[in-house]
Image (cartoon, rainbow, N blue to C red):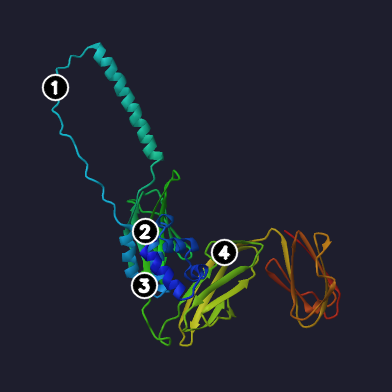
Amino acid sequence: MARLGDALRAQRERKGIVLDQAADDTRIREKFLRALEDGDYNALPGAVYTKGFLRNYAEYLDLDPEELVTLYNAERGVQVEPLRSFEPMRPIMRRSLILTPSVLVPAFVLAGVAIFVAYLYYQFTAFAVPPRIEVLDPPGDAIVQSGEYVVRGRTVAEGRVTVTVFPGPEKYDARPSADGTFAVTVQLKPGANHLEVEVLDPAGKVSRQARAIRYEVAQATVEDAPPQLIVEQPSSGGTFTNAPVTVSGRVTRAVTSVLVNGSAIAVGSDGRFTVTVNFTAGPQTVRVIARTAAGGEVQETRSVSVAYTAAIVTVRIKGGNAWILATVDGSQAPNTNKIYGDGQSLTFTGKEVKVRTGNAAATFLTYNGQDLGPMGDPGLVSERVFVVQ
């Protein structure tokens, strides 16, 4: 077993951490952590990704990242291609050539075959060879102190460039200029970031290059630090069908309040927050704002699409008790036809949902993300039917 794997496993066991917990904490797949500890380098991704994983894992285990990267390079080794030997060329003996039909006919045939082969080769290179891509900035792995970075490079002018940033992932698209150069501004997260730069040409062929960028945040006091907000969910451009939109992320300790679409939400002691938001069908915008006590503010927005293929009805009991009977697609819903207390809620999904209540004023409805309010006056028996549009 490799000395690198022994060091990682010994430190993890010394700290009393199991492998699946380490995978959850570092956001590195368990199979990659196991491959690092077993020295199974063939099971790992490319060297750029592996070094990024190794640095993150080393910091998580309180080990020296650079020392372990050096050990990793030493254990992988470098294979040197043996020198090739060549025999000396013999001089070509020239003979005089006499052009006769027996010489010309085969020559024309060979020329035609050569032209045909050249045509086939051109077609193959035009439609089978992946497009070229060159990442100029960063030229290799990099360490930066800014959360915004401009990725520059050169590729085919008619291609489409996509830069994917992990963790996330966050995707950024761009079109190269006429000379094939491109520049894409990406947002980095504190710590290790893995960038995958991809180009897709009109024939559908793809080429990729990868880079690792470490974003080191400058130290500052909590009082003076500007607010920092990382929205982990939802990803921009996501589609949600028959479900609310989950908004989650984290903020720094300097943040005192977080608002999602204007509503304040709770933030945990670790700076994390999670909330579900109901939207009506169609394009929607999620706006998250983080504020500090000193008046600093930062915000992020995500554009999502919401669709409904069923009638989703949420019943909330508020301000008293209420008898509820619900039928879904002609059948009585389980656990209904009884009295529910203040604060309880139920959700029904189907092509047709019918809700009947014995206390309309205490029964509040939400249909496919739209708040409909109470069903009526106090003590009133009321019934509503919802059919998928």
For discs 4 and 2, the disc positioned in front in the rendered view: 2
Label 2 is placed on what type of residue? Ala
Q: Residues at badges 3 and 2 in contact (C-beta under 8 Å)?
A: no
Report which residue position mark 1 lands on: 94
Residue 347 pos. (x, y %): 73, 69
Badge 3, how many Cα within 10 Å: few under 14, some, many 20+? some
Earlier along the polypeptide chain: callout 3 or callout 2? 2
Marks 4 and 3 sit apart, C-alpha to C-alpha, by 27 Å
| Disc on the earlier residue, 2 or 1 | 2
Looking at the rendered structure, which numbered label has been put on residue 38?
A: none
Counting residues from the start of the chain, the first of labels 4 and 3 encountered is 3
Residue type beneath disc 3:
Ser
Query: 168 above or below 267?
Result: above
Which three-letter amino acid code belongs to the residue tagged 1? Arg
Question: Where does the image place residue 73, in percent across and percent down from the top left?
Answer: 32, 61
Decide: is 236 above or below 87: below
Q: Name the residue under label 3.
A: 146
Which of the image's four quarters has the N terminus? Answer: bottom left
Disc 4 target residue: 304
Q: In which quarter of the image is the C terminus?
A: bottom right
Q: Mark 2 points at which residue?
A: 47
Discs 4/3, front: 3
- First in residue order: circle 4 vs circle 2: 2
Q: Quadrant of residue 220?
A: bottom left
Residue type pointed to by label 4: Val
